[in-house]
Image: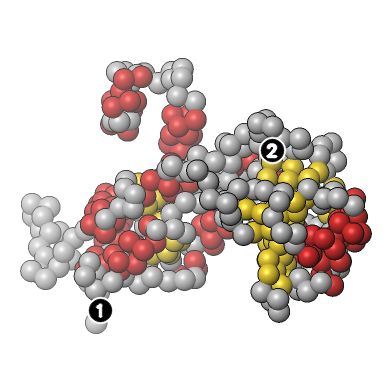
Amino acid sequence: MPQPSDAASESAPVNPHVAALEDAFGPLENSVFRDQQRVVLPAEHSPAAFAVLKDRGFDLLVDVSCVDYLEYRGAKHRYGLIYLLASTAGNQRLTVRVFVDDPDPTVASLVPLWEAANWLEREVWDLFGIRFTGHPDLRRLVLPEAFTAHPLRKDYPLQGRGERHNFPVITRDHS
Amino acid sequence: MAVTQPAAPEGGQLELPENVVVSRLDELASWCRKNSLWPMPFATACCGIELMATGAAKHDLARFGAEVFRFSPRQCDLMIVAGRVVMKMLPVLQRIWQQMHEPKWCISMGACASTGGVFDTYAVVQGIDRFIPVDMYVPGCPPRPEQLIQAIIDLQDKIQREGTITGREFNTRQRQDRKRALVESPLPLTLDASRNPNLQRQFSHPTAQARS
């Protein structure tokens, strides 16, 4: 039997930050899992709702990551972005999910709100190909600049498309 | 002191003093080179830890004259690639290899550098010998320091055996091409080892013999 705090339940006491978001943007899907408050935000509310959260004390963007739900059982959207926010003064954390879809997965950049988003969003762009509008410098972060694919997408083959062998061969004759 | 041409005695035999040794210049150059290998440590992963252990006091690479690890490729003549090489690192590896002066040799240390190891992914190069020439392969994950020492000893033997003062042994386009054909397109292999004893010696690997 699961512990009460383990169950993702709608009946948990309403988080004040989620309540503030719902006042501004209407009802939002949210849940509590092991005392961690989570909320799903439609992509069109992205910059405004994050601005509300920042005003409410979430001064630290801990991480931006992404999951590709291609062929995932019961998934309604393809990409799920995960924003981990923390309030250093209030000692609170909030997980915000934003779902985006093909063919042009796009979401607003959070660099104007948190400088930390710069490299985090570059990494997500690099590996998942999600475009962040308003990002000041959306280049690849970890892969070589000549790389064209986004390899953490589930439809990208594990062994690549020959990128790892696309190099000149140096023999004894020209070295 | 004036150098005088020693007069050839009656039987055509040269009379030499006891402290004079006659040798070929190639052998002398190879003897010098093999006992003063200066490694370029290209350590990218856990094999690099074993490489450091090999150079440290217990295993003491200085016993074989190869203790002078240099971090400039201009001063090295033995590249030891220790660890997996990802596709972003490979152009760096090639550039460092090209910056090293001739004569130079390369040891591919460990399973990852030699074959990619367990990292069969889009980012990891499946063996550095696809892109730079390799003289010695060291198996292991990671290899023991003794295995690396054995590779250096074998490389010394190879240098002594094949080395020339002009580096003629490196003009091996033919040999390189044949080796790459074996690696990348194993079937159909048209080399007939039974007709060519030279081939038999070169492809003494059991799988190569089974194909031929």
Indicate the amino acid at tag 2.
Answer: Tyr
Q: Secondary structure at mark 2?
A: loop
Is B202 on the left-hand or right-hand side of A162? left
Q: Residues within 10 Å of mark 2 (few under 14, many from 20)?
A: some
Can you give x and y, in whole percent of width and height, for residue A130 in the image? 78, 48
Indicate the amino acid at tag 1.
Answer: Ala
Q: Between residues A168 and B24, which one lies in front from this camera angle?
A: A168
The residue pinned by badge 1 equals B2
Q: Residue at x 91, y 59 (%)?
A: A24
Q: Secondary structure at mark 1?
A: loop
Q: Residue at x 68, y 70 (%)?
A: A92
Q: Residue at x 39, y 50 (%)?
A: B108
Instruction: Specify the quadrant of the image occupied by residue A79.
Output: top right
Is B4 on the left-hand or right-hand side of A62? left
Does residue A121 sit above or below B140 in this rendering? below
Could you say which disc has been placed on residue B104 in the image?
A: none
The residue pinned by badge 2 equals A69
Q: Residue at x 18, y 60 (%)?
A: B22
Total marks placed = 2
Q: How is this picture coloured?
A: secondary structure
The answer to the question of whether label 1 and label 2 lie on touching residues, with beta carbons closer than 8 A, is no
Q: Are marks 1 and 2 on the same chain?
A: no
Can you give x and y, in whole percent of width and height, for residue A131 in the image? 82, 50
